Amino acid sequence: MVILRCNVNNVTYRWRDRKTKRSTTRTVNGPQFLCLVMQHVLPKGFRRARNFGFLHPNSKRLITFLKLLVFKRPGGSATPSPTSQTTPRAQWKCACCDGAMRVLHRRILPSTNAPPPQHSQATTNQ
């Protein structure tokens, strides 16, 4: 993004569309321009996730390894065998119409094997 003009009320800038690879010029008012720019500013202490850890472009081997760990089936096989039988899961039923409900979103709970919090203990001299 390149700022071309800035006056009392408006900001004109040029940006390149990644899909079409074409440059486009746009003029917006000052507060709207600040909102557009501030969407890309992270709070202090935060890092961009797309370049960190297993999301980094150079970590394809790590992603493959993590997929093997996550999708590993009990019994040692990472891929399902055609002869394996799976038991159907019990479905949740709607309290109103008694119809089957689908899970649209699951919440991952915090880890239960985390160390206990440190408490300050008063020591007594005996």
Image (spheres, rainbow, N blue to C red):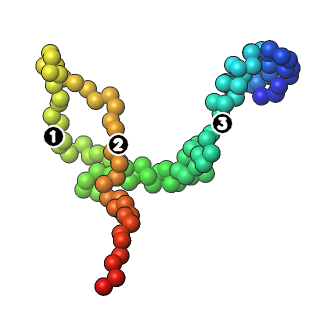
Which residue does the image show at 80% across and 22% down from the upper left? 14
Mark 3 → mark 1, Cα distance in angstroms: 48 Å
* Mark before the other along the chain sequence, 3 or 2: 3
Q: Quadrant of residue 22?
A: top right
Q: Is residue 57 visible?
A: no
Indicate which disc residue 108 carries.
Answer: 2
Q: Judging from the image, what secondary structure is the residue with disc 2 in?
A: loop
- Between disc 2 and disc 1, the foreground one is 2
Single out the mark in the foreground, 3 or 1. 3
Pointer 3 local density, CA inside 10 Å: few below 14, some 14–19, many at least 20: few
The span from disc 3 to disc 2 (Cα, nearest Å) is 27 Å
Q: Position of residue 7 (x, y in %)?
A: 85, 17
Q: Residue at (47%, 51%) from the top-left corner?
A: 64
- The answer to whether residue 5 is left or right of residue 61 is right
Question: What separation in Å lies between label 2 and label 1 (alpha carbons)?
Answer: 24 Å
Amino acid at pointer 2: Ile
Relative depth, front residue between 19 and 94: 94
Quadrant of residue 13 in the image? top right
Of the numbered discs 3 and 1, the one sitting upstream in the chain is 3
The number of numbered discs placed on residues in the rendered structure image is 3
Residue at the spot 35% in from the left edge and 48% down from the top edge: 110
| Amino acid residing under circle 1 | Thr
Determine whether 14 is above or below 75 in the image.
above
Q: Residue at left 35%, top 69%? A: 121
- In the rendering, which numbered label is found on residue 102? none
Q: Position of residue 8 (x, y in %)?
A: 83, 16
Q: Which residue is mark 1?
A: 87
Q: Which residue is mark 3?
A: 41
